[in-house]
Image (cartoon, rainbow, N blue to C red):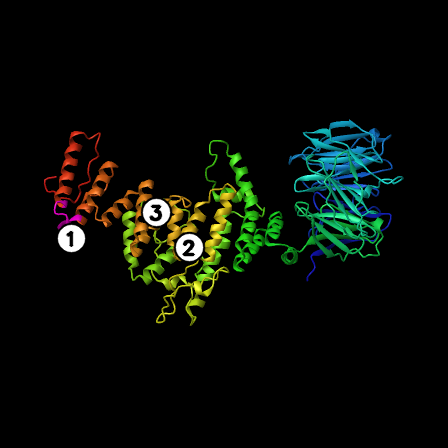
Amino acid sequence: MAEILHFEDIYTWQSDNDRTVFVDSRNSFLIYQNASDKAVRIIDAKNGNCIFSTNRFGKPVCESILVSSDRNFILYWYNDPVTIGIYNILNTDSVDILLDSSQYEDSIVLKVFWSDSHNSTNSNFVVISNNRVDIYNFSFESSVLRTITKKSVSCVDAWNDLSGNYFILLHHNKSLYPYNIKNNEISQLAEIGLSLPYGHQLQHYEICVVTLYDDTYCIYKDVTKGTLSLRSLTNNKLHDKVLEVNSQGRFSSDTFTQISPTVFSLLIPCIGWLEICVIDNLMLVLTGSATCYIFDIAIKSDFLIAKVPQKKPPISTISSDIESFIPSILVDFYGGFAHYITLDFNTLSLYLSRCFTESMAAEFFQRRINCSDRVMEIVNSSIENRLQMSELLSLFSTVLDPYAQTLRTLNKMKGTMFKGSAIPFNLIDKFIGNKSIITEHNFTASALYAFVIKEWKIKYGFNLFDFSITLICYHKNYDLSELLELKHAILSPQSCVDHYILKSQILSHSEETAIPDIQAYLLPDYLGSTVPLHSGSDMNVDGTLGDLEPMNVDFHNRRVPDMYYSRITPYIVTVTLCYLKNLVLHSLNPSNLVLMFFFDICVLYNQLTLLVEMIRSRVIRDSNLICYRLFLLIQPLDDDSLKQLTFDMSKRLKLYTITIHILLMDKKYYKALMLIKREKLDYPISKILHHAADDVVEQQRRPYLWQLILSFILVWTQEYHQEPSRFCQPNLKNCEMWLPNL
C-alpha cells in the first residue's frame, strides 16, 4: 500500500549558534534567521516557496519571530537585552517599532505571540513574562502601538494556542492556569492540576495547546509512560480524554485531577520522543519508534484510525532536537531539517475501507474538509454492491446526521417568521461551504440518479420522466405527439428549477423541443450492442430468478429497452424508500427533488401501485409538477386509479384545466360546466359544447343531455345579467353555432 503519511522537505540549513528557524503556525510559515549575515527568509511551508528575504535584519539570534495577519510586519523578540519590536517587511529601511524594554528589566519574558483581533486594520499581540501578561494593539496603517490590558501573574512557563486567544501558565510544578482573551480582556479558567511522579520537573515540551473540532485542549504528554491527556479549555462539560501509549499495556493514573475523567485507553508502543501534529482535526502522534498513530477524537468508541509507518526523522535522531509545531510542521533543529506533514487521503480511504464499516468510513470523511466526493464514493459503492437494507439504513442515517443539523441551524437563523419553510438548495450549499455535508440534492443526483442511468444506459442529464413516458408510448403504440399537443391545453405558466431531475422537456413551456425518439436517450454502447437491455431483471439480493415474470422481449428491435416487469420491488426503489425513511426519522420533510425522483423511478420501474399508495398517504406531497406528470401518464396507460388520483390532486391544487379535461374524458360534460360556474373560471364553454356535440354515443345513451347542457348555459347567462356581482360571466366565445341567440 502507498504511504499515508508524507514528509515534504521545506528547508535545510547548517545548524550552528548563528542560525536557527522559527515556525509561524498561524500562517504556516517557516522563518530562517542567520544572525551573522543579517538574513531572514520567510518560507511558505505548504509549497516551500520563499515569500520574503532580506539581508538587512541586523538582530541577534531571536527567541521568536512571527508574521502579522496582513503579512506585512514581523514581531520579534530576543534577550540580552530584552527587546520586543515590530519590523516592517515592506519598508526595510524604516525604524522598528519597539516596546519600552525598561518595563521588562526585572522580568523574564517567556512568550510573545500575535492574538486574533478579527480586524484587518490592526492586531493584538501578547507578551507573557514571569510576573505579568500584557496585551498590545498595533495598527497596520499608522504603525501606532498602544497598551490594551495588563495583568499581574506568577508563572515559570507559558504556552498558547494557534489563534493566540488561549494561553496556559505554569504556576508551580503541578498547577496549570489557563486563560482566555476575549474582547481585549483576560479571563482565568479553571485550574488544571497535574498528577506527576515524585521529583518530576515539568518540561516545556510536555504541554501543548491544540484545537480539535472547535474545542481547544490542553494536552499533557508523558513520554515515560506513553500517555496523552486531553482537557478541554472551551467546554467544561467535555470529559477528559486519556490516551495511553504504554507498550507494556498498563493504564496510567489520571494525569489531570479535580475532574473525574472518562478515560479512553489506547495501547501504543512509544520510544524516545512523542510529538503531536494536527491535520484536518486529526491528531497525529509522531514517535521515536518510526510509527505514527492517527487519532480522531470525534469517534465514539475507539479513537485510533490508523497506525502507519513514519519515515522521518530517522530513529537515531536525538529526541531533544525534535519539535513539532501545530498544525503540521516538524523540525529537526540539530540536523537542520524542516518537514511539512501531509496525509494522502486516497490511501487512507483505501485503508479505512478494509478496516471500517461503510457507516464509520462515511462518518469519518464527513468530518473532513472537501471530502464530499469520498463520502459519495462510499454511498455509490454501497448501492452498487447491493448492500443489505439494515446496513444501508445505518449508512444513510450517518450521512443525514450533519445535513439535518445544518438545516436546523439555518432554520433558527431565519427567525420565527419562516420557521419550518423550505430552504433553497443554493442557500444550503453556500452555508455548507467546503464542509463534507451531503445534501438531498447531492445524494439524489450523484447516487440515486447515477445508479438509474447506469442501469438503463441512459445518457447523463436526461429527465427520467421524459425517458419513461417515451418508452411507455413506444410499447403502448401511443403517439407521443398527441401528448405534446395535449400539454399546451393543460399547462399554465410557471417557473421551474432548471434541473434535469425536476424539469421535463415534454412538460416544459420553453422552446426546448421534446425528444420523441427513445433511442436518443440511450448511450451509444447500448445502441451498438447485440444483446437487449434486460431491464426487468432486477438484481435485488433478496430475490431470485424465479420471482421474475416473463419479459416482453422485442427480438425484432433489440435497440429499445423492454418495459419493466417484476414481482419484487426493484432495488433502487427500495434504496430510495430507505433514504426517504431516514429523512423522516431525522424530522425532515423530503424535498421536491427527492420526491420527484421517486415518482419518476416508480413510473420507470412500473411500480404504479406503490406510487398510488405513496400519493394517497401524502408521502408524496401535492405539487403542480406531480399533477402534470400524472395527467400525461393516464393518456397512454388509461388507468382508472391514476385518473382518479390526478382528478383529486388537480382539484386540491386548483389546476382546473386538468380537472375539466378529465371530466371531458369521462363524458361528464354537465359536471364540467358546474365546476366552471362554481369556481368562476374563464374557461371556453365552446370546448365543452364541442366535445358534447361530437359524442353521439353519449347523446344516444342520454337523450336529455344536450338540452340539459344548453339550458344550464342559458340559465347561467340570465343569472349573470341579473346579479353580475354574484355570478361570473360565461366565456361564450365561438359558441354561436350552438347558442346563436347569446
- Residue at mark 2 to residue at mark 3: CA–CA distance: 16 Å
Q: Amino acid at mark 2?
A: Ile
Q: Give the crowd class for mark 3: few <14, some 14-19, many >=20 residues within 10 Å.
A: many
Total count of labels? 3
What amino acid is at disc 1? Val
CA separation, marks 1 and 3?
30 Å
Q: Which residue occupies the foreground of this view, 648 or 678?
A: 648
Q: Is residue 54 visible?
A: no
Q: Which residue is mark 2?
A: 601
Circle on res. 697: 1
| Residue span colored magenta | 692-705
Between disc 1 and disc 3, whose residue precedes?
Answer: 3
Instruction: Report the mark closest to the observer, 1 or 3.
Output: 1
Is 229 placed left or right of 723 in the picture? Answer: right
Residue 533 location, x and y as percent?
42, 66
The circle on residue 627 is 3
Residue 322 in the image: x percent, y percent? 81, 50
Give left or right: position of 38 versus 712: right
In this rendered view, identify the residue nearer to me: 210 or 335.
210
Q: Quadrant location of the C terminus?
A: top left
Label 1 secondary element: helix
Image height of 20 relative to 170, above or below: below
Say which element carries label 2.
helix
Residue 401, image quadrant: top right
Q: Residue type at mark 3: give it.
A: Cys
Left or right: residue 699 compared with residue 467: left
For the N terminus, give its image quadrant: bottom right
